[in-house]
Amino acid sequence: MVEEPRHSDRFPEGRWSDIEVVLRDGRRISSGDVHATGGPEAWRTDAEVEEKFHLFCEGVLPKQQAKAIWKMRARLLEEDCLFSELAELVRE
């Protein structure tokens, strides 16, 4: 991985990147320039963030555990919340 000046020059107005993968048979696959979503200029909705969270959990955590962790995020903002509550969910 290397810094690409053309992308760095566009920061912080945009968060750009690209990737090129060289396959074993020598073929090259390039993404072209891609602008990252989720920042101030390309905000994700709560539904999009939740969908991404569950996608990342798929095959790693049981669905019920992932749902409990997602639900816990709101609880973390409450004054009486203990981090140990989240830790218990993650350790299951």
Image (cartoon, helix red, strand yellow):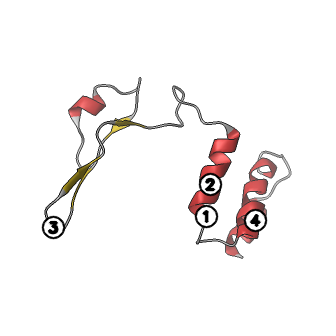
Q: Which mark is residue 6?
A: none
Dot 3, crowdedness within 10 Å: few (<14), some or many (≥20)?
few
Q: Residue 54 vs residue 7: left or right? A: right
Q: At x 82% / y 54%, what residue is drawn?
A: 81
In the rendered structure, which amino acid carries the disc numbered 4? Ser
Residue bearing mark 1 = 57
Q: At x 77% / y 56%, what residue is drawn?
A: 72
Q: Which mark is residue 25?
A: 3
Q: At x 17% / y 59%, what residue is drawn?
A: 27
Of 66 and 72, nearer the camera is 66
Callouts 3 and 4 close, C-beta under 8 Å:
no
Q: Judge depth for marks 1 and 3 and give the one in front.
A: 3
Q: Residue 92 vs residue 7: left or right? A: right
Q: At x 29% / y 32%, what residue is drawn?
A: 7
Tell me if residue 27 comes above or below residue 92 in the rendering.
above
Sequence-wise, which precedes: disc 1 or disc 3? 3
Rounded to the nearest angstrom, the CA distance separating label 1 from label 4 is 20 Å
Dot 1, crowdedness within 10 Å: few (<14), some or many (≥20)?
some
In the rendered structure, which amino acid carries the disc numbered 3? Asp
Callouts 2 and 1 close, C-beta under 8 Å:
yes
Rounded to the nearest angstrom, the CA distance separating label 2 from label 3 is 34 Å
Residue 49 falls in image quadrant: top right
Q: Residue 61 vs residue 77: left or right? A: left
| x and y percentages locating residue 84 in the rendered image | 75, 65
